[in-house]
Amino acid sequence: KISFIHRNWLAITHNLPVSQWYYEATSEWTLDYPPFFAWFEYALSHVAKYFDQEMLVIQNLNYSSPATVFFQRLSVIFTDILFVYAVHECCRCVNGKQAGKDILEKPMFVLAVLLLWNFGLLIIDHIHFQYNGFLFGLMLLSVARIFQKRHLEGAFLFAVLLHFKHIYIYVAPAYGVYLLRSYCFTANMADGSLKWSSFSFLRITLLGLIICLVSALSLGPFAVLGQLPQVISRLFPFKRGLCHAYWAPNFWALYNAVDKTLAFAGLKYKFLDPEKIPKASMTGGLVQEFQHTVLPSVTPLATLICTFISILPSVFCLWFKPQGPRGFLRCLILCSLSSFMFGWHVHEKAILLAILPLSLLSVESPKYAGIYLILTTTGHFSLFPLLFTPPEIPVKILLMLLFTVYCFSSLRALFRKAGPLLNWLETIYLIHLVPLEIFCEIVFPLTAWKLKFPFIPLLLTSVYCALGIIYAWLKLYISVLTEFVTVRQKAD
């Protein structure tokens, strides 16, 4: 399915003039990424024509061939060079005080493996043929530049990233607040508060120029053509509904599950009229708008308000007590998790926006290592439904087992003096992922429920993983807020 999306985008950008890119709708996989990614597809299409000309024919819907698959795999591997370089730069930013004598126990080595061998990124990019490694490379390189005090480079890379894929707007508040607070203000008072006289108009002007120039380069041609409304409507298709075809494991998954349970009970005990129940089902496996049956239906505005409220404390902490680049990184992770929790039409793979940057903190502190183990294990397990064909099942299980075992063993070795990284309740929760997988993949397909309730495995996976991800989010938030209060008290 995913290869069809990028094949269609290759065909659109190769054959049509720029003025038609965001209007073409022969396929259901319309171009809905920002202009920089469209130009990226355009560049790839001029290489793709040497592999198979037929993949560049717009009318060849659902076209696939060995040459097409080979090209997509090769292009993903080639663009991952940027990701490898970004990982190298991030490893240079890691605090290595607790490094062991063995290189395998050094934080930099562990971090490199956690990022380069990330299970979620591996299956999304190299089985579904997407370019998330290239995009995450831009994000991690931007974070590394912030750590290295190269703020303008970090801002430039992030601005470019936003115009490649707009999902990274999730973490824009962290960038905006940190750069304004720690770059535009060049000095603080003795108590750590702002020294307003140190505000640099030159620095904020430079940041503004970077943002404006990148935006003009990306959106300028479409603004000249009068097509900005069309581009924006493609980038933010609110009619796709609150949840993706497979519910992302977030707050709305629990909300949907409660509504579904209440509706089922209402019909069984005749509290609800079957004729008045909305026909669009949120478990139908379709990308569409739907109305909740019992609970109030959720609007895009409601999700925006919830997201804004959820990120506000982390941004508040960053503004009043930045605590350097690591404070920025914690805020970035909380912004991505908060947006994942309450965003509109969130994709399940968006959990990687939190897992990958959290890897940097996990090798520096046992506190963050424990949170990382919960989030990465649960978040990666939630991606299992993306690989559903029989040949893919043993592959995904083996790959995740290898990665998870390495995560637990390497982080435990790194912090062996700190004691257990997880408490007994967290351990029990993660262990129960095993029987859940056995039920969904082996037991359920053999039951009579498969025909009547085909959505049950997806629902159980989404809801159970949502509990773990929400727990990790809350635990991280409490940790950050506690640290903020402690630092403020010491300053006072």
Image (cartoon, rainbow, N blue to C red):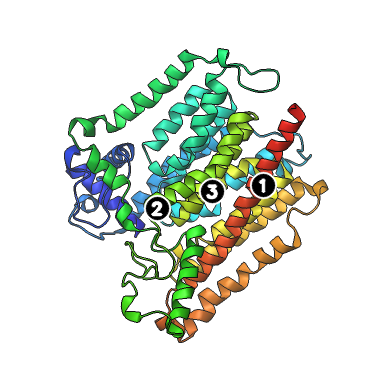
Point out which mark residue 337 bears.
3
Above or below, 92 against 234 in this view is: above
| First reached walking from the N terminus: tag 1 or tag 2 | 2
Residue type (three-letter) at the residue carrying disc 1 = Ile
Give the residue pinned by disc 2. 129
Q: What is the secondary structure assignment of the residue under circle 3?
A: helix
Q: Quadrant of the C terminus?
A: top right
Coordinates of residue 17 in the picture (x, y in percent) = 16, 39
Identify which residue, 270 or 332, lies in the foreground: 270
Name which residue lies at 62% across and 40% down: 360
Q: Nearer the viewer, mark 1 or mark 2?
A: 1
What is the spatial separation of the Cα atoms under label 3 and label 2, in whole angstroms? 24 Å
Q: Residue at x 56, y 62 (%)?
A: 465
Q: Nearer the viewer, mark 3 or mark 2?
A: 3
Taking the image as drawn, is residue 216 in sight? yes
Which residue is drawn at the image coordinates 34% and 24% (left, top)? Answer: 213
